[in-house]
Amino acid sequence: MPDIDLLKGLAPDEAASVLALGRRVVLTTGAELFHLGDTADSIYAVTRGRVRLTLPMQVRSREEDVLVEECSSGQTVGWSALTPPYRFTLTASVPLETEVVALPREALNRYFAGHPDTGYTVSFNLSCVIGQRLQLFQAMWLREIQRMVESRCA
Amino acid sequence: MEMLLMGACLSIFGLAVACLAFGAATRDTGIATAAAPAAETEMMRAAVQPARFFVTPPALPVAARSSVPIEALLLQIENHVRLEHAAAQCFLESPNPSMLHSRTVSALVN
């Protein structure tokens, strides 16, 4: 079992208890884990393989799923399940056979109510994952704006 | 005399072959190109010409860019996203303005 970013800082038995709340899901090559707009009930810890996160883009009048981010073993995808309005904002699919642990929001909330320290650590890790994503895309966005400004001033 | 006439005939024949070869090499190739508007044809020709010193090569017109297969375009987009992702991660590791303004080798924007 790889180190899961969401469970960083937890004692091994505590991390195992959280993972035991979920169920293992094996996805075959090309399978979709969740789709943009779906109700998000579970967050997914990638334990093997890779997950492609995509957004639809109009390319020559055709809608194409364009890669936004790739997550590999140890990373968490689908944190829309833990933040209102609990709807996925990306589509996730797998380019190769991949295994994830699906952690349902309800089960996590119940467990964290009884284990607030674990809940705090997981929430802290989740805020790190979300914050890093925000900073990353902020930098990517600024680079695109910079290029646009340069092309307009050229 | 016969030798002189034979030499003259061979020379004329050689000249004719050379003229035909030159004509074939310099003739426009595609029927479609001939049918395209003259200005666009000129732009295309200018764009595919090799770069010259102190001259910025003109950009390909939109019509020529759209001839790139959609699969190739999607790969270019994917490659661009990966490169930008890596550049943004470098910025987060050691934030400084130059990392935000660094150039990309992405074919999508060059």
Image (tube, rainbow, N blue to C red):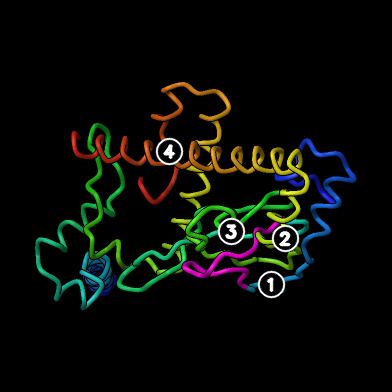
User: Of label 2 and label 1, which has the lower sequence position?
Assistant: 1
Chain of the residue that carries numbered disc 4 in the rendered image: A
Residue type pointed to by label 4:
Gln
Question: Is the residue under label 1 in contact with that under label 2 (CB below 8 Å)?
Answer: no
Q: Between tags 2 and 1, which lies in front?
A: 2
Q: What residue is pinned by disc 3?
A: A81
Mark 2 → mark 3, Cα distance in angstroms? 12 Å
Reply yes or no: does residue B58 show up in magenta: no
Mark 3 → mark 1, Cα distance in angstroms? 24 Å
Q: What residue is pinned by disc 4?
A: A138
Mark 2 → mark 1, Cα distance in angstroms? 28 Å
The furthest residue to the front: A114
Determine if marks 3 and 1 fall on one subunit.
Answer: yes
User: Of label 4 and label 1, which has the lower sequence position?
Assistant: 1
Q: Between tags 4 and 1, which lies in front?
A: 4
B86 vs A65, left or right, is: right
Where residue A13 sits in the image (x, y, percent)? 90, 46
Disc 2 is placed on an element classified as helix
Q: Is residue B24 visible?
A: yes
Residue range in magenta is A32-45
Chain of the residue that carries numbered disc 2 in the rendered image: A
Q: Between tags 2 and 4, which lies in front?
A: 2
Circle on res. A107 = 2
Residue type pointed to by label 2:
Ala
Figure check: B94 above or below A81? above
Q: What residue is pinned by disc 1?
A: A29
Chain of the residue that carries numbered disc 1 in the rendered image: A
